[in-house]
Amino acid sequence: MDLTGKIAIITGGCDGIGRASSLLLAKRGAKVVLNYLCNADRAEEVVSEIRANGGEAIAIQADVRDETQVSKLVSTVIASYGRVDILVCNAKIGFKAIPFADMAWDDFSQKLNDELKAAFVTTKAVIPVMIENQFGRIIYISDSLGKDPSPYMIAQGTAKGGLDTFSVYIAQEYGPHGISANVVAPGLLDTEASDFLSKEEKQIVSNFTPLGRVAIPDDVAGVISFLASDDARFVTGSYTPVTGGLTME
């Protein structure tokens, strides 16, 4: 899966899946533009690690829900590298994990609006340059909650279900321009974001998972790297669960 010379923007690139993907795509030859919102120090740590291993990377701050900031991000990338080949939409969007009975419309709609606006804005920004080059790989990071409901996750699951649908429309419309759009949908990940669960609770999930464990970010990054590569040149509109078999398509 050689990505030599490809230009990749990875939103939310300094933690979890984003960090693992930034490191792996750079290792396989891509020039990585690591987007972040708040944690500049952590973003620079990832950039430094990539450079120390012989790769090329820069970090750019931008709120992926803001058209002006994303436009500036993409313009900077084009000025530096001339094009954008890969977009990994991975920025984390906060939400309230509460029962539907306790949820207000504003809580629910905030997650839907933020999640889909982030995908809309970033996709809209890269599509023109991808059309110009007749090449693009767009990978949306969803999660299994879009298809497999879990208590208190109605806002997250509904938003990710919308993202799954959004992806197939992008795939259908822009396939004739050499642009693919695919979804990667992890389940429970062993990261800081899941530290609210005890080891016992994670073990329960592992016990129900055919491959016998909870995912780590590298598991997801490998699938992202494949979809970004020429090995996936005839794959678009796909939904790939990365759940160790807990979700099967």
Image (cartoon, rainbow, N blue to C red):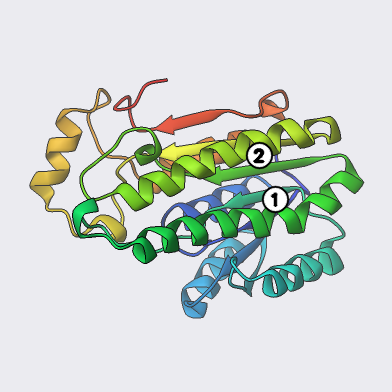
Which quarter of the rendering shows the N terminus? top right
Expressed as whole percent of the image width and height from the top left, the position of residue 129 reads 85, 53
Residue under label 1, please give it. Answer: 30
User: Which of 72 and 202 lies nearest the eye of the viewer?
Assistant: 72
Residue under label 2, please give it. Answer: 228
Expressed as whole percent of the image width and height from the top left, the position of residue 188 reads 29, 43
Q: Amino acid at mark 1?
A: Ala
Which quarter of the rendering shows the C terminus? top left
Q: Amino acid at mark 2?
A: Ala
Mark 2 residue element: helix
Expressed as whole percent of the image width and height from the top left, the position of residue 102 reads 20, 59
Mark 1 residue element: loop
Expressed as whole percent of the image width and height from the top left, the position of residue 98 reads 22, 57
Whether label 1 touches label 2, CB < 8 Å: yes
Q: Is residue 80 above or below residue 131?
A: below
Is 221 displayed left or right of 156 in the figure?
Answer: right
Looking at this view, name the residue that lies furthest to the top: 249
Is 98 displayed left or right of 5 in the figure?
Answer: left
User: Which of 234 and 68 lies nearest the eye of the viewer?
Assistant: 68
Give the residue displayed 82% in from the left and 34% down from the top: 178
